[in-house]
Amino acid sequence: MNRYSRLAAIPSFGEEGVRKLRESRVLVIGCGALGSHCAMGLAASGIGNICIADFDTIDLSNLQRQFFFRESETGQAKADILSTRIRELNSEVEVEVINKLVDTSLARFIFPDFDFIIDGSDNPATKYMTDSICAESGTACCIGGVRDFQGQVMSWQPGTTRYSDIYGPEPPDGPVLPCTAGGVAGPAAAIAASVQCAEAIKRIAGVGNPLYDKLFMFDLLIPETRVLEVG
């Protein structure tokens, strides 16, 4: 327990909470700014099995907000490099890698195998897919997003408000600004990802109040943090 002693020392968590994390399986969709932070945070906390999914490769422009990649690794698969970082951080964690886009058919096949899904993707289409298949399979999830210095995070379990209930039944028409145009600040991504990681830990360990029927929002430029009731 030495590795997790500071976590176990939290009164509401204890060794029972650590045990629950060790016996859990979490899927992280995306290995970019949100997903890479989430995966490393989950590994450090002792999630027993982490599956990371991403089809992209490392670009120099990623390093401003994706802190677990190196200049020498540009051009290599993000999921492969991140899996190495996870094992270096915590050799007790089992890591699975999916080097492809998680589409609807794949999601239907794999989502029921996990206790929790974290969507750290960078596009609305994937977030809507996560929302839809989680609702179909009854798998709890957390969806996060960032743009410039702002971020939004929400969680879902059966019977609570869905992503599509908040943002509409279909992805928005027309192009969505990529990071090259809209921009993303590294600290904003780190905060949103930390909240997503905490949501997974709370859900699995059964502590605290997850962001069900709530939307966590922040803007670091103001600065301002809000939790909107959406249920």
Image (tube, grey):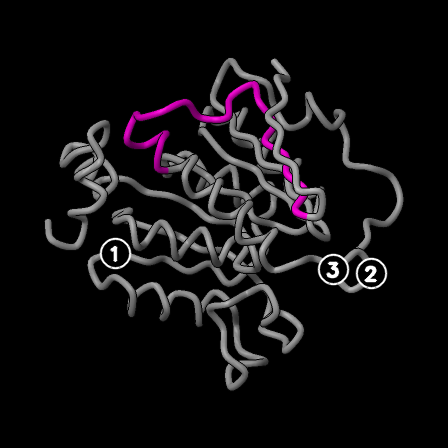
| Residue 227, placed above or below residue 56 | above
- Left or right: 189, with 158 as reference point: right
Q: Residue furthest right?
A: 174
Q: Is residue 203 magenta?
A: yes
Which label was assigned to residue 179? 3
Q: CA distance from mark 3 to mark 2?
A: 5 Å
Q: Which residue is mark 1?
A: 93
Residue pictured at 57% horizontal, 60% vertical: 32
Name the residue type under label 3: Cys
Look at the numbered disc 3 and give the secondary structure of its residue.
helix
Residue pictured at 60% horizontal, 13% vertical: 231
Instruction: Name the N-terminal-most of marks 2 and 1.
Output: 1
Name the residue type under label 1: Val
Q: CA distance from mark 1 to mark 3?
A: 31 Å
In the image, residue 87 lies at what x, y percent?
29, 66
- The reply to whether callout 3 and callout 2 are in contact (CB within 8 Å) is yes
Q: Residue furthest bottom?
A: 72
Q: Which of the two marks, 2 or 1, is nearer to us in this view?
A: 2
Q: Which of the two marks, 1 or 3, is nearer to us in this view?
A: 3
Viewer-nearest residue: 160 or 111: 160
Look at the numbered disc 1 and give the secondary structure of its residue.
loop
Badge 3 crowding class, 10 Å Cα cut-off, few under 14, some 14 to 19, many 20 or more, is some
Residue pictured at 53% horizontal, 45% vertical: 106
Viewer-nearest residue: 92 or 148: 148
Residue pictured at 61% horizontal, 50% vertical: 121
Residue 126 visible from this viewpoint: no
In the image, residue 212 lies at what x, y percent?
51, 21
The magenta stretch spans which residues?
201-220
In the image, residue 154 lies at what x, y percent?
56, 31
Viewer-nearest residue: 186 or 116: 186
Q: Which residue is mark 2?
A: 181
